[in-house]
Amino acid sequence: MRPVPPQEALARNRLAVAGGFATQGFVFISLTTRLPEFSDKWDLSEIELSLLLLGLVLLAGVGTLAAERLAPRTGSSAPLRWAFAGTAVTVTAATLAPSAPVFFVSTSLYGVFLGVIDACVNMQAVALEHRYGRPILPSFHGSWTVGGLLGSALTLATADADLRWMALLAIVPVAALAAPYLPHERSGVPDADVSVPWRPILLVGAALVLFYMVDTAAFTWGPTFLDRAVDAPSRLVALATFPYLLASGAVRLAGDDLVRRHGAVRVLRAGTLVASLGLAIVVFAPAWPVAVLGFLVMGAGVAVVAPLSFSAAARLAGGDTSDDGERRARVDAVIARFNQFNYVGALLGAVMTGVVGAGSLRVGFAVPMVLVLGLLPLATAFDPARRLAD
């Protein structure tokens, strides 16, 4: 067998990691778009369903902490494969559960594996971006969006099918087990010797919180907004999600080139203004087609915030050290913990929009419309030339 040239091997690693992102998005959206059916099957109240979602988010945070501890010892590819195997098992168990308690336990365990995957694919992505020497994270997050779109399309196409067919979803994470992920050697640097510049990383993390606040509000409350605030036909309320995902995926796939041409700070600031405009269109929409347009504009605006945040955090964690082992140790120490900002934003988006918008969801969406502008001053933390004191 001929040896694989380094560039060809790197291309295979990149395709594998993109597939990992797509697998995560596909399974997650496939499950969440079926939650109303699971709720009907097990006669779950709104409070019970809310507690299930809260537990899912919190346990995903536990999974990221587990990845943080495992990755420096085993590399990120090993826990990534274990988590895909666990996802296959828990998705099957949740789908075929004979009782509500089994469904709850299976779904909760899936949350842990979701967190591990979330952390590990981002570890793999930032390691690949370092090796390529140019921005490539937006396209990886675009792969997640493509996977989510496929999951949504599958849900629509099989809306009348029995829920048990979803056990076949396990095939996708099982297939992801064999992908040639990036080998991630142990750094050889003890955890105690790792010095991380947390102050600038926290500024980037604040940007990630604001993104997920908007993102989760769109996914969680968008369909309800179309249904209650602008009286959209019930069969079309999913149009709050589809345009958002389509616009987000398109911008993310083009994001690598946008950042190379215009820089992260300009792209982020322009996207912030576009996102606030999209939210304003939603808030003041006189009819549901206008609100759908608002969700599309919103998705395009915030699309690259998450990948740029992970990229900036990895760059800041690595610092100026010429020791590749020390750089890897710093990045491993940061990425999984940095992923916790994801879940803080998700909780804010789901809870705050609903609580503030209890009387009117227009008021609920006005909150992220204003708060997303906080990305404008935070954008300077994404400047590759900027170095802030620890």
Image (tube, grey):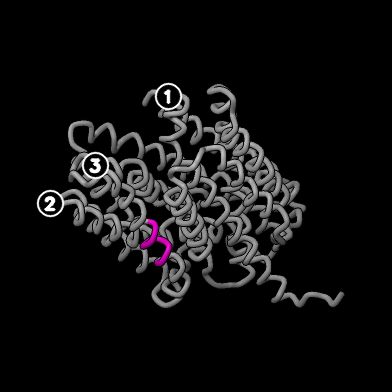
Mark 3 residue element: helix
Distance between mark 2 and mark 3 Cα atoms: 13 Å
- With 71 as the anchor, is 165 left or right in this view? left
- With 337 as the anchor, is 152 left or right in this view? left
The image quadrant that residue 317 belongs to is bottom right
Q: Is residue 153 magenta?
A: no
Vertical order, 54 against 11 (above or below): above
Q: What residue type is labelled 1?
A: Leu
* Circles 1, 2 touching at the beta carbon (< 8 Å): no
Distance between mark 1 and mark 2 Cα atoms: 34 Å
Residue plotted at (74% across, 75% down): 6
In this orientation, which residue lies closer to the viewer: 40 or 223?
Answer: 40
Q: Does the magenta stretch include residue 246?
A: yes
**Residue 115: x %, y % from top left:** 57, 42
- Would you name the residue on which mark 2 appears? 286
- Would you name the residue on which mark 1 appears? 44
In this orientation, which residue lies closer to the viewer: 10 or 314?
Answer: 10
Residue plotted at (40% across, 37% down): 347
Vertical order, 192 against 77 (above or below): above
Q: Give the range drawn in magenta.
A: 245-250
- Would you name the residue on which mark 3 appears? 227
User: What is the crowding at mark 2: few (fewer than 14 residues within 10 Å), some, or many (at least 20)?
Assistant: few
Total tally of numbered discs in the picture: 3
Q: What residue type is labelled 3?
A: Asp
